[in-house]
Amino acid sequence: METVKTEQFQERQIELAGWPVRLTSYRVGNQYVVQADNVSPGACLARFSAPTLEEAESQAISKARHLLGKTQRHAVA
Amino acid sequence: MAAQYAHPEVLVETDWLAGKLSDPSLRIVEVDVDTAAYNLGHIPGAVTWNWTTQLADTVRRDILPREQLESLLSQSGVKPETTIILYGDSNNWFAAWAFWQLKIYGHKDVRLLNGGRKKWIAEGRDLTQEVPSYPATQYKAKEPDLSLRAFLPHVQDAVGKGAAQLVDVRSPQEFSGEILAPPGLPETCQRGGHIPGARNIPWGKVCNEDGTFKSIDDLKALYGAEGINGSKPVIAYCRIGERSSHTWFALKYLLGFDNTVNYDGSWTEWGNLVGAPVERGAAKAAGAR
């Protein structure tokens, strides 16, 4: 069975559209994988793989920002 | 010596699993929130179950029907004596959902990989894109044990008669009613807020940064601070019942609060009911009700 090890795992938190977002990235083979989740609960909003970390991250951030921008805040009396 | 979980046998560590990848008595199953994550690479030998299509009745709103569970396990080469090791992304969120359903249908030996997919990857362990195939079995499930599951009347009793403690495991913003669904996800209920009397203990608080479960002492402190100590039955709920299956796992198997059930109807049932009482606003301090 052909296997590959993951490398360069890292996480960092940013804010998009007013919401905290966790970016998780790692390299597997010759691809970088970047996932954006909404921290709480941690649902995956976007995940992209690309030959460079920057490209994968840019796409993940773009899609996550788009989805988070649709979230409505309601008044709580 | 550190205190032990009530049922430590339901957790396995990454080191242990790495040495057991060829063990035919195990079946490793990946269940992710991100249902395509498996295709990027998975633990060698693992199969995957899709929570949206394979761990729910796809017609009516319900858990997996018995015959479909039997089919899924048979296709995965699982026998009643197989040890099923579940793991997934996001702190084993949906792996716990699968665990709950397997216990409802009486599979004896089910375990979670402590730390899940995240810890396995963070440790730089092997992944593969090869999809394994196992000889099909003729799995026969037991009658569903619905004592692990709360239905609406049970929850109404908890509200009306104080028959159980309610633990809302959603985020504080969902609990208060500020948002109707987790950020970035579609709204699926008519009203925001929480079930009256519920305590808000977000599900992810039971995990460490590396995705592993916190120590039993930390878990006791977390829930004890909200008056949840196992002295009364507990009903865990969230939006659709999967985050709360994770909390159900922690309460029942790690803390040993045997009388804990998962209300999978959760907020998308309660928050859509006509005339149901709803509370709004941030959580109050325990004992301040």
Image (cartoon, coloured by chain):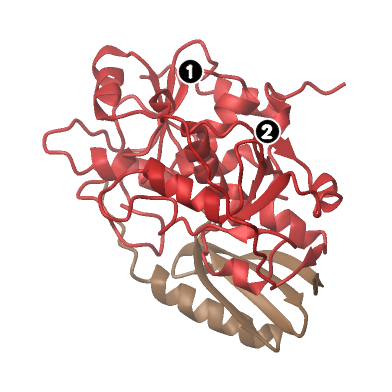
Chain colours: A brown, B red
Instruction: Mark yes or no: residue B202 visible.
Output: no
Q: What residue appears at the point 80 percent right and 49 percent down from the top-left corner?
A: B23
The x, y position of residue A68, in whole percent, is 41, 68
Q: What residue appears at the point 50 percent right and 18 percent down from the top-left corner?
A: B227
Q: Secondary structure at mark 1?
A: loop
Give whichever of A3, A22 is nearer the camera: A3
The x, y position of residue A66, in whole percent, is 41, 76
Q: Chain of mark 2?
A: B
Q: Is residue B77 above or below residue B84?
A: below
Q: Quadrant of residue B233?
A: top left
Residue behind mark 2: B10
Labels 2 & 1 near each other (Cβ < 8 A):
no
Q: Secondary structure at mark 2?
A: helix
Q: Amino acid at mark 2?
A: Val
Q: Is residue B191 left or right of residue A4?
A: left
Disc with the residue nearer the chain's start (2 vs 1): 2
Q: Quadrant of residue B289?
A: top left
Q: Amino acid at mark 1?
A: Asn
Q: Is residue B34 above or below residue B114?
A: below
Same chain for the residues at labels 2 and 1, yes or no? yes
Residue behind mark 1: B259
Q: What residue appears at the point 65 percent right and 64 percent down from the top-left corner?
A: B133
The x, y position of residue A43, in whole percent, is 50, 59
Q: Is residue B15 left or right of residue B172?
A: right
Q: Chain of mark 1?
A: B
* Cα–Cα gap, marks 2 and 1: 17 Å
